Image (cartoon, helix red, strand yellow):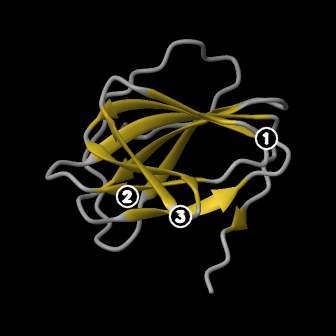
Amino acid sequence: MKGVSIMSDQRVFDMELVKVESLENAVRTPFYQTDSTGGSVWVIKPGQILPKHYHHHSDDIWVILQGKGVFYPTPNTEVPFTKGQVIVSKKGECHGAKNTGTEDIVFVSIVAPVPADYDPVKTN
């Protein structure tokens, strides 16, 4: 999405993405936010991880547009996912992902309410 600006009055969005260049981290591109809801597109390159975390006051819904990987519904559980699936994490539930495939994972994340807190899963 070239030159994306967050516009609360825009109602139709084109999810065609340019390749996001980040060799180390998953990349989040916000495209929508109001006082109650936020929308972002995430790109996770092969081998990258979106760290396990919690939002204590917000739900986070992922619509998988491309790729495959594993989802972390708990800190020690992996569940495979692929394009065409929707992943729902209610407030207080662990979530994160790892790209186990050979192409980028691309997904839309809808979070509500915003702002969402971010609490990383603590590792021992």
Of residues 23 and 92, the one drawn nearer to the viewer in this rendering: 92
Q: Which amino acid does the dot numbered 2 rest on?
A: Lys
Of residues 84 and 10, the one drawn nearer to the viewer in this rendering: 84
Compared with residue 76, is residue 124 higher up or lower down, i.e. above or below? below
Q: Nearer the viewer, mark 2 or mark 1?
A: 2
* CB within 8 Å, label 1 to label 3: no
Label 1 and label 3: CA atoms lie apart by 22 Å
| Residue for badge 3 | 76
Label 1 Cα crowd, 10 Å radius (few <14 / some 14-19 / many 20+): many
* Number of marks present in the image shown: 3
As drawn, the label of residue 71 is none
Q: Quadrant of residue 18?
A: top left
The percent coordinates of residue 34 (x first, y second) are 77, 29
Q: Which amino acid does the dot numbered 3 rest on?
A: Asn
Label 2 and label 3: CA atoms lie apart by 13 Å
| Residue for badge 2 | 98
Q: Quadrant of residue 119?
A: bottom right
The percent coordinates of residue 106 (x first, y second) are 34, 40
* Element type where label 3 sits in the image: loop
Label 2 and label 1: CA atoms lie apart by 22 Å
Viewed as shown, does residue 106 lie left or right of 47?
right
* Element type where label 1 sits in the image: loop
Which residue is at the far front? Answer: 77
| Residue for badge 1 | 58
